[in-house]
Amino acid sequence: MSKLVVSLDGVVIKEVQITKDKTTLGRRPYNDIVIDNLAVSGEHAVLQMAGSDVYIEDLNSTNGTYINGKAIKKQLLNANDTVEIGKYKIKYLTGDLPDYEKTTVLRPGTMPTGGAMAAEPPTAVPPASIRVLNGTAAGREVPLTKVVTTIGKPGVQVASITKRPGGYVFAHVEGAHRPTINGAQIAADSVPLGNGDVIELAGTQMQFVMA
């Protein structure tokens, strides 16, 4: 069963199972998914099921519909895709994924050093972490325990690190400028991470470390 997890500023506000052939999203109260915000058009987008696939189509909305930071008209949704409408983020999850876990946005000086961590998903990929190299949080190390971890400064520059069966993948999510890996600006939508890679994002240098 597929579902959508709607969040605002990292806080989950609703979860919706996709059970109908067509699921509408917009500001008007007759939509299946209602987001009461002026950045959302009255009839903003529609999700259509085709077998096990789910497509999302923008309905000529005022502010547009984005998937993983790119404007779309109609596109097939893949597991873990993030649909962005205004300031709202809508995570697309499929039935074979673990329950949704809130991503952690790491900000220099406020990075978590411990406490409750999400359970490790069943995978053969070795554990990894991000070590901060500069700023007030230099020396802090944050384990990548979630399937998707979001890092950076919202509204400035944001990227994600996704744990996949074949390893870890780094992707640009938000911001006019793309982050760099080992001093080179990433050109692709997503790139694999290797042990020791140095990421620079929103003025913060971080090293990807595998166990």
Image (cartoon, rainbow, N blue to C red):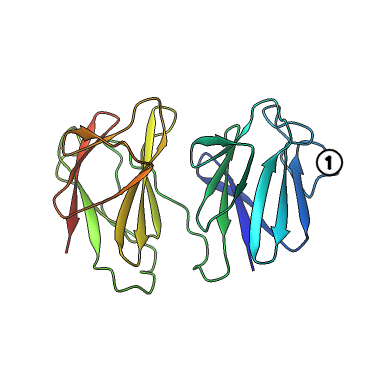
- Dividing the picture into quarters, in which one does residue 154 lie? top left
Q: Is residue 56 above or below residue 59?
A: below
- Number of numbered discs on residues: 1
Q: Residue furthest right?
A: 30
State the residue at coordinates (51%, 36%). 70
Residue 15 location in percent, x, y? Answer: 65, 56
Q: Is residue 141 visible?
A: no
> For mark 1, does the 10 Å Cα neighbourhood hold few (<14), some (14 to 19), or many (20 or more) residues?
few
| Quarter occupied by the C terminus | bottom left
**Rendered residue at 70%/32% (across/down):** 40
Q: Quadrant of residue 52?
A: bottom right
Give how far across and how far down residue 151 sits, in percent: 35, 42
> Label 1 belongs to which residue?
29
Q: Is residue 39 left or right of residue 142?
A: right
Does residue 148 show up? yes
Q: Is residue 146 above or below residue 81?
A: below
Q: Quadrant of residue 31?
A: top right
The residue drawn where x is 33% and y is 61% is 145
Which quadrant holds the N terminus?
bottom right
Look at the numbered disc 1 and give the secondary structure of its residue: loop
Relative to residue 110, is residue 92 drawn left or right?
right
**Residue type at the position of mark 1:** Pro
| In the displayed structure image, the side of residue 3 where residue 206 appears, left or right | left
Left or right: 74 in relation to 128: right
- Image coords of residue 191 (percent x, y): 30, 47
Give x and y (percent) for residue 72.
59, 37
Where 49 falls versus 157 (above or below)? below
